[in-house]
Each structure stands twice: as structure tokens, then as C-alpha cells.
Amino acid sequence: MATQTMDGMEPRFSLPDSTPKSSKTVLAIGGLKIYVYGLEEAIAGQTPDSHGDLAVFYLAHNRTRTYLVTEGIAHEVLYRYREDSTRARSTPLIAVTMNMRNHGDRESQIYPPANRTWQDGNEQHAMDLVSIISGSAQDFKLVLDYLPAYVPQFTRFYNVMAGVSLGAHTAWRIASLASPGQIHAYYVVSRDDRKVADEFPTDVPLLLCNGVHDKLVPAKHTASWVEDRRRRNQESGIEQDITFFMQDNTGHSCTKEMVAMMAVWLRDILPPSPRSPRSSL
């Protein structure tokens, strides 16, 4: 695995060959093909004490990429989550991802030029980007609503929404679409959406990651939002679990350190099994 990029920055995460892969299940929900990781293990590991609880880690990938990016993240996070020996037993965890709108196998069916930027000659880049974000958020909301029907072995769900770059905007948008209590926590790598940010729920844990040298989504903007949110929460007497990680020597990337942090964070915010009253759902 590369230790640095040609410009000296930390590289994007790449799944190590040494990481054991979880099971992969393909489902079609409402015409959407989704990829589910770790489902076989979660079903096999059920015990009478698990009470049908299941944590679902939704992952939205970055622009011009495919679900294979978040597939790698899913395998690494699931492995680290299961192998963490700091807690005797945690809520079973699966990961879910899909190709974002106009990406992967959905790109060839629609309009590939819509993924290009202004520099690439796409004069409609702004509306193309925002509409893809909005549409992808609606896709994830559809899966959030109906996935429980496809896994009847489980009866209580702790949903965690995560995204990288374009996927981070999508995860951010989910906050305005999800029903109260439907999302247990959010993980975002680079984000900026003013209206959604202002109205972001105050009752769920939040992990934000930024590269210090991110030129596309400068860390100073995320830091400003975190500072303002913490101040307003304090003034209102609200306690919200907000973690903000800025990685040195890093640009607009999701690094191996950020992925490792995901697994630790999930262990911290998800209730142990059997069911704990910590859940906000």
C-alpha cells in the first residue's frame, strides 16, 4: 500500500490484502441494486440475547467512483469492528452500499457527461452535481425504509449513515429526509451544505473528518460549523456527541486512519448486546 501520493499527501484508503472479507449479498429494493456485507455472519451469530438487534452502516461513495470504493471500506470496518476486544460483545453490524445516481452501472444507462466538471466542459456541473446528491439521498432513504422487510431475522435497527466527498453531501442530505429517530449516527468525510447544516439534528452522534490541506472542502469551514454547533448546543443545554478529526498532510481524501476511526467510533456509539438503553431510536 502506498505511504504517500506523488504530491506528498496521505493516500486514499485501499483495502489491504491481509483484511479478511465479509460475506456479500446482493439485494434489489424498489428497483435499486444494493450490496450488503456481513449479513451471513450477523444471521449466523444471532443468539437469544441479541433480541433481533442489527446495526446497519450505510456507505455512500465519492464522485466518479463506484460502490467498489465503499465496498473496501465496508470490509475493513466490519473486520475491525468484530476483532475489537475492548468490549465483550457488540450489536451485530452489517454494511450497505450502492452505486450513486449516474455512477457505475447506472452511469452507462443515463448520461456520463453529467459527472464531468466545468473544467471538463460540463456547463451544467452545478445542477448535475446537486441533483445527483439529492436523488442519491432519496435512494438511500428508500433502502432505509424497506431493508427491514428483506431481513426479517432482525426486528430493531440502528442505522448509521456515512459518506465520502459526494457521498458525504448525500449523508448530510439524509438528515432532512429521515424520520425522527431513524438514523442513530452520521459519519461524514468532507461536507458543506448550509441549509442542511443549519437544520442538522442535535440528538445523534456525529463524526466529521477533513484533510488539513483539502482544497475542495476546506477544513476551516467544517471547523467553523462544529464550533458554532457546539456553542449553540451549550446555550440550549443540549449534549451532542460531535467528533471532528482533521488529518495533517491530507487533502480531499478518505485515508486509512479515517477508516480505522470509523470502526472505533461505531464501537463507541452503538449499544452493546444485549440491548442497551443508550439507543436514540
Image: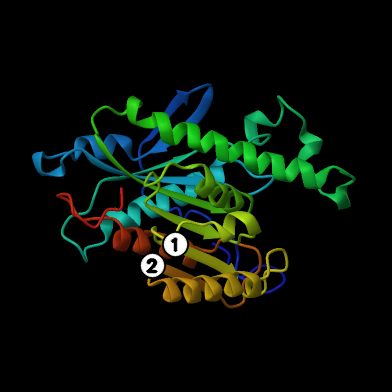
Asked if 76 appears above or below 35 in the picture, the reply is: below
Determine if residue 164 is in view: yes
Q: Position of residue 40 (x, y in %)?
A: 29, 34
Q: Position of residue 15 (x, y in %)?
A: 48, 53
Q: Is residue 70 left or right of residue 111?
A: left
Q: Position of residue 17 (x, y in %)?
A: 45, 53
Q: Nearer the viewer, residue 216 or 198?
A: 198
What residue is pinned by disc 1?
Answer: 206
What residue is pinned by disc 2?
Answer: 241
Q: Nearer the viewer, residue 37 or 178?
A: 178
The disc label shown at residue 27, or none: none
- Mark 1: which amino acid? Leu
Mark 2 vs 1: CB contact within 8 A:
yes
Which residue sits at x=46%, y=24%? 29
Which residue sits at x=78%, y=38%? 114
Q: Secondary structure at mark 2?
A: loop
Asked if 91 appears above or below 36 in the picture, the reply is: below
